Image: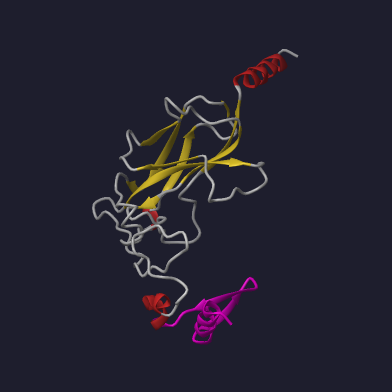
Amino acid sequence: MNSRLAVLFLVVLASTITLVSSQSVVDFTPAERDNNICKNNPDFGPTNGLQNKNGSCSDTVQGEIPDVDHMVSSLIVEPSNGETLEANKNFTVKISTINLVTGFFDDPATQYYTFPQVVDDKTGNIFGHSHVTIQLLKSFDVAPDPKLFAFFKGLNAPEVDGLFSQEIGSATNNGLPPGLYRICTMVASFAHQPTIMPVAQRGAQDDCIRIKVVDSKKKRNTLNKKRNAKFL
């Protein structure tokens, strides 16, 4: 039995187990709830502010959790879900997010996951920021590898007129090459952990859409077919 299994076995023995929908749910003892899993788990080193690709064990407390009237919600308003865009041409992703005090983040290189979530005592909303991540899809039926992405950008500045806006592409690397893509938001507290909500049954705090990116000639042919179909 390896050390990780041994730790899990000891935790299960010291816990009360109930069955819900045929899955075991462990009710940890007070001592185990007190972040002792990091002290008793030799396979994971302590989280130290670095983004450790081999994993780590964090003893940072979850922090302040907002009430149900201040839960985070996001919607990608541009581009539209299912939209066809022209390849190698810059475009803008616009995101509407509510119940988040935007523009707050710590140093992701040295302070990753090192601070608990904090709620603004004036608004009741979480201090944090968001991200845009775009992934190339093999098809609309296969989940993409999370390690691979075509574009990623932290939205660290405050929203303007209630919207995050991020241009995709630059003067030297325009837009996206042809393909199927998923565009998602990733809302985070200021220390980069996913925002923690007060209840399990709720709407998602993030949004995703799927788009097609095609070369300009193919897009023109598609538009012409749609126009012609209207007159048939």
- In this rendering, the answer to whether 29 lies above or below 61 is below
| Foreground residue among 139 and 125 | 139
- In this rendering, the answer to whether 87 lies above or below 157 is above
- Determine which quarter of the picture holds residue 114: bottom left
Q: Is residue 190 rendered to the left or right of residue 167?
A: left
| Foreground residue among 152 and 17 | 152
Where does the C terminus fall, quadrant-wise? top right
Question: Is 125 in the magenta?
Answer: no
Residue 85: image x %, image y %? 56, 27
Residue 125: image x %, image y %? 32, 52
- In this rendering, the answer to whether 5 lies above or below 156 is below
- In this rendering, the answer to whether 19 lies above or below 106 is below
Q: Is residue 90 rendered to the left or right of residue 102?
A: right
Q: Is residue 80 rendered to the left or right of residue 59?
A: right
| Foreground residue among 5 and 32 | 5
Residue 48: image x %, image y %? 34, 64
Q: Is residue 17 rendered to the left or right of residue 98?
A: right
| Foreground residue among 19 and 225 | 225
The magenta region covers 1-30
